[in-house]
Image (cartoon, rainbow, N blue to C red):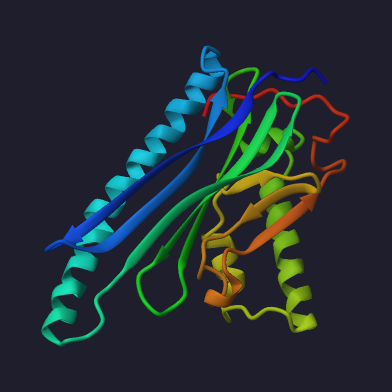
Amino acid sequence: MEETALHIEPFAAEREWMVEGIPVLSASILLPQAEPKKDRTARRIQRYYQLQCRAYLRYCQTWLFPQAEAEYHTALAASAPLPSYRAELRYAVTYQEGSLLSLYTESREVTGPGPALVTRRGDTWDLAAGYPVPIQSFFPAGGSWRKRLLTLAAEEIQRRERAGVSRWHEDWRKQLRRSFNPQNFYLTAEGLAFFFPMYALGPSAEGVPVFTMPYGEALQISSKKEPPASSPG
C-alpha cells in the first residue's frame, strides 16, 4: 500500500480564567497537526483541529467558567475552599497506515471531588482524498453493519458482567440502541473500535465504554488491503 507522506505533530494551547485575580478554571489543549503544511490535506486537517480547539475554548468560556465563578462566590461567602476547575483536551493516534489516519480526541473536566467527566470523539481520515471516512465504508455494501456492531457490544457487555469485571445500567440494552452514534469510532491495529458516551450504559466507573470488532470478512480493512474509497463527510 502506498504511504501518504504526512506526519502528525502536536500543537498546544493553554488558557486560564480568573475571578478577582484568583484562577478558578484552567484549560490545556493538545491536538494534532499534519506536516508538511504546504500539503492540501495537511492544511485541511490543521483547520479542522484548530476549529475544534477554538470551539473547546468557547465551551470553557461560556459553560465552565460561569459555573466556576458562581462556585467561587459561594465558597468565598462560606469560607470554604475555592474552586479550581480543570479542562483538558488531548488526542491519541490509534492507526496510521497507507492513506488512513485514525485517532480520537478526549476531553476531561474536573469540576469537583467527583469523577472527571470524559468525552471522546473519533476521527478517521483518508489522507489521499483529504476527507473523513464514514464507518459504513469499512463494511460490505448493503450489509447490516449497525446490527453487527450492536450485537457484538451486547455480547461483550454480557461477558464482562458474567466475569464480574463491569457493572451496567439495568436498561443497558435499550440505551445501547439509543446512544449508538456511527461517528463514534476509530481504527486500531486489532480492529474497528466503537464507543458510547460516559454514563450512557453504566456508572462512572465504566468510563467511556469501548468495543472492538476484529478485522475479517465483515470488516473490509487490514494491513494488507487497500483502504476503501471515502466520501466527503
Question: In this orientation, which residue lies closer to the viewer: 56 or 156?
Answer: 56
Quarter of the rendering containing residue 150:
bottom right
Left or right relative to 57: residue 220: right
- The picture places residue 194, in percent across and down from the top left corner, at 65, 52
Left or right relative to 84: residue 226: right
Identity of the residue drawn at 62% across and 71% down = 173
- The picture places residue 65, in percent across and down from the top left corner, at 23, 60
Question: In this orientation, which residue lies closer to the viewer: 26 or 218?
Answer: 26
- The picture places residue 94, in percent across and down from the top left corner, at 69, 44
Question: In this orientation, which residue lies closer to the viewer: 172 or 92?
Answer: 92
Left or right relative to 204: residue 14: left
The N terminus: image quadrant: top right
Question: In this orientation, which residue lies closer to the viewer: 47 or 129?
Answer: 47
- The picture places residue 182, in percent across and down from the top left corner, at 58, 46
Q: Is residue 175 above or below residue 88?
A: below
Circle count: 0
Identity of the residue drawn at 78% across and 82% down = 162
Identity of the residue drawn at 54% across and 67% down = 175
Seen as rendered, the residue at the extreme front is 21
Left or right relative to 222: residue 137: left
Q: Is residue 200 above or below residue 54?
A: below
Identity of the residue drawn at 62% across and 64% down = 209
